[in-house]
Amino acid sequence: MVTRPIPPAIAAIAPDGKLTPRQRRHFMIGMSLRRQKPGTGSAHSFMMKRTADIHWPDLREILKGMDWVLIGGVATRAYMPERMTKDMDVLVRYDDGDEAIDRLKKAGYKVISPLAVKGYLLHSPEGVELDVLYGKYKWLNDALANHEYDPAGYPVISLPYLIVLKLAANRGRDVGDMSTMLGWTDEAALSLVRKIVAKYSPEDVDDLESLIFMGQMERQIPPEDEH
């Protein structure tokens, strides 16, 4: 087995090269901030589009009477231009999880396997991947009671709690999603995001501000000499 040398930039953070999820996010944010220039994002007209052109299973009738919200990549289309993602993620209360799975099975969904966290991967009758997560978060009741809707009319977790989830996930794709969503939201919404992150994920407050800054830099009009 070939041993690869640890890049100096990574060794400065973790000498053994084993970055924690939070260190990995710090590294990616730092790299983005060093390279970023004002106005390096997409056109404003495109960034303001909110579409539901990609078809995902409609669970509203199946889960009628139960509190649930979309999270993950599909949920981001409520706050930024729609993007591709391999599956649809649904969050329900822990105590509602088994009933949700039973209803989905009766509707033709097939349970494939347990998830790494409490919940299950299912396939729709058309073969679409669906992750159902059983939630026990301290903020879950508030998030379920105060959700938003995406352009298809599906219930979507509100932006502050979506950011809390993505901060916890610490994946590369999440950094890009967060900076885009935060950069294109208004100050009133940002104030609520700051409040919720400070309450439920205070160790990530500094990263949140960096992500907001990155997103707002992308939407700026570049200097005239760079056109």
Image (cartoon, grey):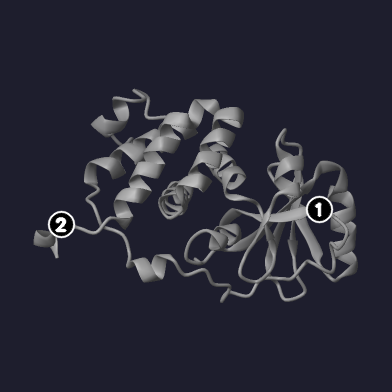
Image-based side of 70 in relation to 77, left or right: right
Position in image of residue 212 (x %, y %): 40, 43
Position in image of residue 154 (x %, y %): 69, 65
- In this view, the residue in front, 168 or 128, is 168
Label 1 and label 2: CA atoms lie apart by 47 Å
- Mark 2 is surrounded, within 10 Å at the Cα level, by few (under 14), some (14 to 19) or many (20 or more) other residues, namely few
- In this view, the residue in front, 2 or 8, is 8
Image-based side of 165 in relation to 58, left or right: left
Image-based side of 220 in relation to 108, left or right: left
Q: Amino acid at mark 1?
A: Asp
- Which quadrant would the N terminus be assigned to in this image? top left
Res. 134 image quadrant: top right
Query: What secondary structure is found at the residue carrying circle 2?
Result: loop
Residue 170 visible in the displayed image: no
Residue at left offset 40%, top offset 51% = 183
Position in image of residue 90 (x %, y %): 71, 55
Q: How many numbered badges does the structure rendering display?
A: 2
In the rendered structure, find residue 223 and report the number of the disc placed on it: 2
